[in-house]
Image (cartoon, rainbow, N blue to C red):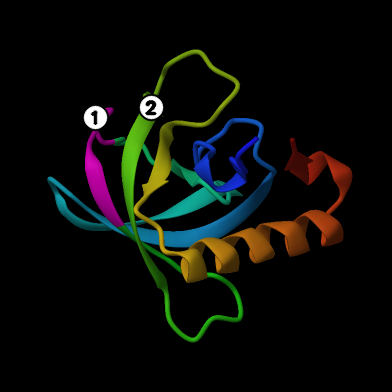
Amino acid sequence: MADTSEKLNPIDHRAPRVEYELPVAYRSVAGFVTDWAVNLSRGGLYINTDKPLPVDTVVRLLVTLPGAHFPVELKGRVTRTNALGTPSSQSPGMAVEFLDVDDDKRSRIGEFVERLRSELPEEATRK
């Protein structure tokens, strides 16, 4: 049987994720925007914003990982949104799936998520 571990969907909703605030910048119709990512996994993140971009919008992201000298530049696609005023347990914002991430960046993000999962209380991490 062939090894399919690298062929998994990068935004696999079962991927380890962590609730953690990270500054993230991206371009929108209104110009360059800085918001906070509040949920991060190896395959994507959730950005708190009152003005989410439409689903399927491709966006360039600059994500600042703690301890890094420079922000990580990533390409992503909006997969779902939660508009302001929508009844939901999640804050207004948008989920972004990472696209075309090279092995180095994916590894750095994955290592960061795993380190946080081991350091943070159980309620801050989800499977």
Residue extending farthest to the top is 87
> Which quadrant of the structure image shows residue 60?
bottom left
Residue extending farthest to the front is 1
CA separation, marks 2 and 1? 7 Å
> Which quadrant of the structure image shows residue 118?
bottom right
Q: Residue at x 33, y 36 (%)?
A: 78
Can you identify the residue that label 1 sits on?
Answer: 54
Q: Position of residue 1 (x, y in %)?
A: 65, 35
> Which quadrant of the structure image shows residue 102?
bottom left
Q: Is tag 2's residue or tag 1's residue first in the polypeptide sequence?
A: 1
The overriding secondary structure of the stretch rendered in magenta is loop
Q: Residue at x 50, y 71 (%)?
A: 104
Please state the extent of the stretch shown in magenta in the rendering: 53-60
Q: Nearer the viewer, residue 67 or 41?
A: 41
User: In the displayed structure, does residue 68 sit left or right of residue 110?
Assistant: left
Q: Residue at x 66, y 32 (%)?
A: 14
- Looking at the image, residue 53 lies above or below residue 25: above
Q: What amino acid does circle 2 point to?
A: Thr
Can you identify the residue that label 2 sits on?
Answer: 81
